[in-house]
Image: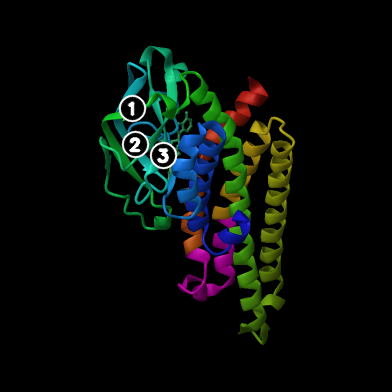
Amino acid sequence: MLEALSRHSYDFAFSLTNTAGCAARIAQEMPRAIAERYVPAMLKGERFGGSALSEPDAGSDFAGIKTHAAKDGDDWILNGAKAWITNAAFGDVFITCAQTDPAQGWRGIASFLVDGRREGFARSLAEALAGGGVIGAGGFTLKNYRVHADEVVSTPGQAFRRAMAGVNQARTYVAAMCCAMVDVCLETAIAYGKERQAFGGPLAAKQGWRWMAADIATDVEAGRLLVAKAADLIARGEDAALASAHAKKFATRMAIGRISDACQLMGAAGLREEYPFLRHLASARVANYTDGSTEMQNERIAAILVG
Ligand SMILES: Cc1cc2nc3c(=O)[nH]c(=O)nc-3n(C[C@H](O)[C@H](O)[C@H](O)COP(=O)(O)OP(=O)(O)OC[C@H]3O[C@@H](n4cnc5c(N)ncnc54)[C@H](O)[C@@H]3O)c2cc1C
């Protein structure tokens, strides 16, 4: 489904899957009364949400987050700021990570359900991006925001592990969505190349042009096979850390180069707004950062390979 949507708008699909992922976690991991409060509204598209890990001073170095959670009886009081959060421009249901004890490093991180309609939550200005704006990336601050005991999603020590486990699925989705963007760009270029005449025949008859199209197709095929491998491991409940890192690294990098190549096949026409090339190129750039940057995929792969 995300592949089909991403052919038109990666950004919309990414926004949708963040709300859906948040709703799924609330449904599966939280008490029924809380799930009933949020999940139907999220599924109806009345409320939007996501996962809030990143901060103004901590992105790749997730263990370095500074948003603080202090115990107050059975409740927790949160203070801090989140940045670059999908759907934060308009959403208000966020599974939010906070540090309970800086001396514990990643073991001190817990996650909490934060409701943007409650006291202590203030939305920041959304990021004004040159592309990918539909994702609604933005931030929020928490000032003495009170989390009730039954709104703790993952306890200290569990949140980091849970985030790392969930990220394999997210990485596989992103990889699949990148393959879909390249695929639709290739299809568009081929349709154009069959019509456009140059040097006494269609562009699509020129060997140099055709070979570029064939190279793009090979990369999409390779990306899809890496996605299929990771998705299969996830579906069988097996460890997909390595497979999803390979899939995400390959597909996001490949999308940058291959969307650009498909645009080249179109000549200047590829720059027109009616075509997906530049929109998808901006989204492919975004994909190289979300759910762990390309370099963080390499870190994961190397840690598994080398130790
Ligand atoms: C549109 C959009 C939506 C997002 N949505 C969310 C969201 O919903 N929730 C959320 O929590 N976050 C979200 N993010 C944030 C995303 O997870 C971060 O951008 C990402 O983790 C990278 O962090 P950073 O941008 O702070 O880069 P930095 O961590 O500052 O890194 C800058 C560059 O240096 C590289 N780098 C960093 N450390 C190393 C290293 N040790 N070795 C080699 N290279 C390194 C990085 O790969 C990157 O290329 C979103 C980002 C974008 C752009």
The answer, for residue 289, to whether it is visible in the render is: no
Q: Position of residue 18 (x, y in %)?
A: 49, 46
Q: Is mark 2 within 8 Å of ligand 1?
A: yes
Side (left or right) of 50 relative to 220: left
Task: Please tell me which residue is depicted at 38% across the width and 22% down the height of the picture.
Answer: 99
- Callout 1–callout 2 Cβ contact below 8 Å: yes
Q: Earlier in the sequence, mark 1 or mark 2?
A: 1
Q: Earlier in the sequence, mark 1 or mark 3?
A: 1
Q: Nearer the viewer, mark 1 or mark 3?
A: 3
User: Which residue is label 2 attached to?
Assistant: 82
Quadrant in the picture for the C terminus: top right
Task: Please name the predominant secondary structure of the magenta segment in the image.
Answer: helix
Q: Is mark 3 within 8 Å of ligand 1?
A: no
Q: Is residue 81 magenta?
A: no
Q: Position of residue 30 (x, y in %)?
A: 51, 32
Is 271 drawn above or below residue 147 in the view shown?
A: below
Task: Please tell me which residue is depicted at 53% across the width and 33% down the height of the picture.
Answer: 296
User: Which residue is label 1 attached to?
Assistant: 67
Marker disc for residue 94: 3
- Callout 3–callout 2 Cβ contact below 8 Å: yes
